Structures are given as C-alpha cells and as structure tokens.
Amino acid sequence: MPKHNDLEQKAFQLIVNSGHEGILQSELWHKLGASSREGSRIAIKLENKGLIRREKELQNGRWTYRLYPKRMPASMDSIADCPCLMCPDNSRCDPSNVISPQTCEKLTQWLLTIAENYSGTLGDS
Amino acid sequence: MLSTIDDATLIKVAEALGEEDAVKLIEILKNADEITDDEIANKTGIRINSIRKILYKLYDHSLVSLRRTRDPKTGWFIFHWKLQPDQLEGFILSQKRRVLEKLNIRLEYEKNHDFYYCYTPGCRRIPFEEAIELLFKCPTCGKPLMHYENNKIVEALTRKIEQLRKELGE
C-alpha cells in the first residue's frame, strides 16, 4: 500500500492538473486507487493545509465534492520563448559588457515579435 | 512542501532548457521514483552522453537530485537521479526575476536613446551619439542611417514588465 504522504502528493498533483475545472472527489479516488474513506481524509487534510478548496456538488443524485487547487501552478508561459532563458552568453550579459541586454539582437527580435503580436504589425515604418 | 506544478509546465521547462530530448527525459523521470542514466537510455533510446548532459543541466538548476553508489563488480560509480518537482516553482520564479531585471535595463536604455537604422535585415540599430561619429552611415552595409521610432519596442517592454511584475506579486 502506498504511503499516505505519496497519496497526498499524487492527489494534490491530480487536483493541480485539473486547473480551473476542478476534479470530483469520487473521480479522484478512482484514479488514485484509494478508498473513498482514505480519499476524503486526504481531501480534508489538503483543505486544512490551505492548498485546495472543496465545493459541494450533486452528481448522479449523490452529494460529492469538487476539488479545486487554491493556487494556480506557476506558469512558464510569459517567458517560455524569451531568448534570455537559456542563453549561452548569460554569464557575460551585463550592461558594462559587449554582450548586454541593452543591445542584444536576440532580445530585440523577441521584443519585436511581442510587439507584432500586440499590434498585428511588424516593427516601425 | 507539496509542489504546485502541472504537467504542461513541467514540459515547458524541459523545452526551455533547449533540448528536445529533455522533454522525453522529464517524462521518464516524472514517472519513476529514482532512475539511473543507463535505465533512461534503455527506455528512451537517447544516447547516454546526451542524457548525462541534460541531467547535469537539470542538476545545475536543482531540478533533479543525485545519489551516487558504487557498482560492487566493476567499482564504477552508478548515478541515481530523481526529479525534484518542488524546486520547479522556485526555478520558474528565479528565471522570471532574471528576465525582468534584463527587461528593466533594456527599457531604461530604449527610453534614454534615439536610434538610427539602415533598415537592412541583419544590421543593428545605432544610438544617436554613435550615429554622429559614423556620419549616419551604417558600419555594416554602408547604407545611410535613418531615424528609427522605437515606441513599439518600448510598449512591448512596458507590457511584458508589467505582466512579469504581476506574476511575481511585486
């Protein structure tokens, strides 16, 4: 039988992955292979820790809970395509150096792409 | 602490590490408790040296942990790797802070300078002070330099900085 802490982590991961839609408590226990008793105890524990929120919901004539993550997971979306992220020149990138965020062409291109996405037109004319 | 990282973000981090194979590797690490580089090579078919390169990169950012044992037969070291999802959030936040710092420096520079450009792809924009010395001639292609309005870059910078500040809760 898996350790209680492992189950808690797995349950939390499933709830986090469910995002804004949340996940039904009953559905969660099926996925975890746990009993409903075990499951509801973990849900209460996670709720007490302030990690999730439970909302009562009627499902097929039975009352159950839908579980939502309280804090949305940290997202990479805003910087996923930024060239600075894994730039090989990062250690040398400084305003006092030849390689600088002030003049970096890769950064310029990224900014122009963002500007294009905002306005639908490229660069300046 | 329980981590709040969804699978999609995990994959994006792997992609950001710049390696196509990193995505496959993370998938394997995610589903295994602890795994050796040999086992990953057998499962993915990726060359062992590429796997080690990616693992060390992940290790540099504390995204994986490492345990070393000795093979009793050969006396060689065996490395056991484990994904540390609780470190991912910290990794993302520190990357955002780093990008934000660079964007702030860039915004300051863009606001305080007037730029001239030859409008040839591949050539760089020249600030006014340097353009005077160059007699308004592009040092790369020799074409005349004309004024370059950078308001779109400034706007993109301002929006991105605002977005990152919000995400970082600053």
Image (cartoon, helix red, strand yellow):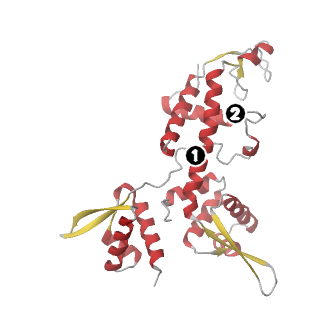
Quadrant position of residue B41:
bottom right
Q: Left of B117 or right of it: where is A7?
A: left
Label for residue B96?
A: 1
Which sits in the foreground, B149 or B93? B93
In the image, is residue B148 above or below residue A34? above
Residue visible at 40% across and 57% down in the picture = A19
Instruction: Say what secondary structure mark 1 lies in.
Output: helix
Quadrant position of residue B145:
top right
Q: Callout 1, which amino acid?
A: Lys
Q: Chain of mark 2?
A: A
Point out residue B143 in the picture as x, y percentages from the top left corner.
76, 17
Point out residue B37 in the picture as x, y percentages from the top left corner.
70, 72
Residue visible at 61% across and 29% down in the picture = B107
Estimate how packed mark 1 is, as few (under 14), some (14 to 19) or many (20 or more) residues with alpha carbons within 10 Å.
many
The answer to whether residue A122 shows anywhere in this view is no
Which residue in the structure is indicated by mark 2? A105
Q: Chain of mark 1?
A: B
Q: Left of A56 or right of it: where is B114?
A: right
